Image: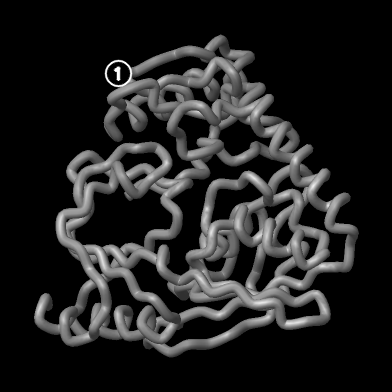
């Protein structure tokens, strides 16, 4: 496999600590990590894996992820080098999957394009935001997405309009068809750059006021139960500050579990299970995790 990887001409590293690649700062080593720099290279990597019978793990910004302490055997494909952004005119911006969502927001603001303000501060990649239809403060990706470029199961580069992406709450077609997002185009509206920046700053301040950004986490741990809020249910059950090892339910926002220092993936999993058990016993609501476990 390594000879074939070298032949592709794609950057790679072996035994990469996932604690350095995730916002939780948790996770053992990835056996082999590939860093394609173009959608074409991403396609080549996926084709090679398919030919070798290897199912790779696709890594975006690592912000909604808990990697087990033993790490990831096999191949991880990182999108972090897919960084192209282009204004295409008529309110359309194309960006590759590895662009951080915050950087896309700033790029749009500088073009005088509004509509992405809700996403400012979401700590993920643009590709990951499409994959899970990320959202906050009344907005979500499906509101502004025009189309997505992706690699299908056969390794071919394809594109679908937003209306065919089955975008729903924290869900998209890519969770079901194994497509890998390579890039996306958003459709925004004209706006005043100063007003857009002010709204972005307001959104960021809300995050700083309400979320434990000072400690490593994977963002909101649980999906929002219908008609309820996970954080409120957890707080109602007296679980703020509850700890297992180095993992702790945030005192600032109970919907977050933070790495308070030296937390292991096992600590986090145990704390999630404890929260689920207590909340279901006391409220009848089962909290479904939003973060991905690898």
Quadrant hosting residue 34: bottom left
Relative to the observer, which residue lies in front, 286 or 76? 76
* Residue found at x 33% / y 22%: 261
* Residue found at x 70% / y 77%: 87
* Residue 212 place in picture, x, y as percent: 55, 26
* Residue 176 place in picture, x, y as percent: 49, 68
Relative to the observer, which residue lies in front, 40 or 57? 40
Residue that badge 1 annotates: 245
> Tag 1's secondary structure?
loop
The 10 Å Cα crowd at callout 1, few under 14, some 14 to 19, many 20 or more, is some
Using the rendered image of the protein, determine whether residue 162 is visible from the camera's viewpoint: no
* Residue found at x 34% / y 49%: 21
Quadrant hosting residue 82: bottom left
* Residue 291 place in picture, x, y as percent: 47, 44
- Tell me the quarter of the image containing the N terminus: bottom left
Q: Is residue 34 left or right of residue 155?
A: left
Is residue 91 placed above or below 137 in the rendered structure? below
Q: Is residue 289 left or right of residue 14?
A: right
* Residue 149 place in picture, x, y as percent: 56, 80
Quadrant hosting residue 115: bottom right
Is residue 235 placed above or below 115 in the rendered structure? above
């Amino acid at each position: 496999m390594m000879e074939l990887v070298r032949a592709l001409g794609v950057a790679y590293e072996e035994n990469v600590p996932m604690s350095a690649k995730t916002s939780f700062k948790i996770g053992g080593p990835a056996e082999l990590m590939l860093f394609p720099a173009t959608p074409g290279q991403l396609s080549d990597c996926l084709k090679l894996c398919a030919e070798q019978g290897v199912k790779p793990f696709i890594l975006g910004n690592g912000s909604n992820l808990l990697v087990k302490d033993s790490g990831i055997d096999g191949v991880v494909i990182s999108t972090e080098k897919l960084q192209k952004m282009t204004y295409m005119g008529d309110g359309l911006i194309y960006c590759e999957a590895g662009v951080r969502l915050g950087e896309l927001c700033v790029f749009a603001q500088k073009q005088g394009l509004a509509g992405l303000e809700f996403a400012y501060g979401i700590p993920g990649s643009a590709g990951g935001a499409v994959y899970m239809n990320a959202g906050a403060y009344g907005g979500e990706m499906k509101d502004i997405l025009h189309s997505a470029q992706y690699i299908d199961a056969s390794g071919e580069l394809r594109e679908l309009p937003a209306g065919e992406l089955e975008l729903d709450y924290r869900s998209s077609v890519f969770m079901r068809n194994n497509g890998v997002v390579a890039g996306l185009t958003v459709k925004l509206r004209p706006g005043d750059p100063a007003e857009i920046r002010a709204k972005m700053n307001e959104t960021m301040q809300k995050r700083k006021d309400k979320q434990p950004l000072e400690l490593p986490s994977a963002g909101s741990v649980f999906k929002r139960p219908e008609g309820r809020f996970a954080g409120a249910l957890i707080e109602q059950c007296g679980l703020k500050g509850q700890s297992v090892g180095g993992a702790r339910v945030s005192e600032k926002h109970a919907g977050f579990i933070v790495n308070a220092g030296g937390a292991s993936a096992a600590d986090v999993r145990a704390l999630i299970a404890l929260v689920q058990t207590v909340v279901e016993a006391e409220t009848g609501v089962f909290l479904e995790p939003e973060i991905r476990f690898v």
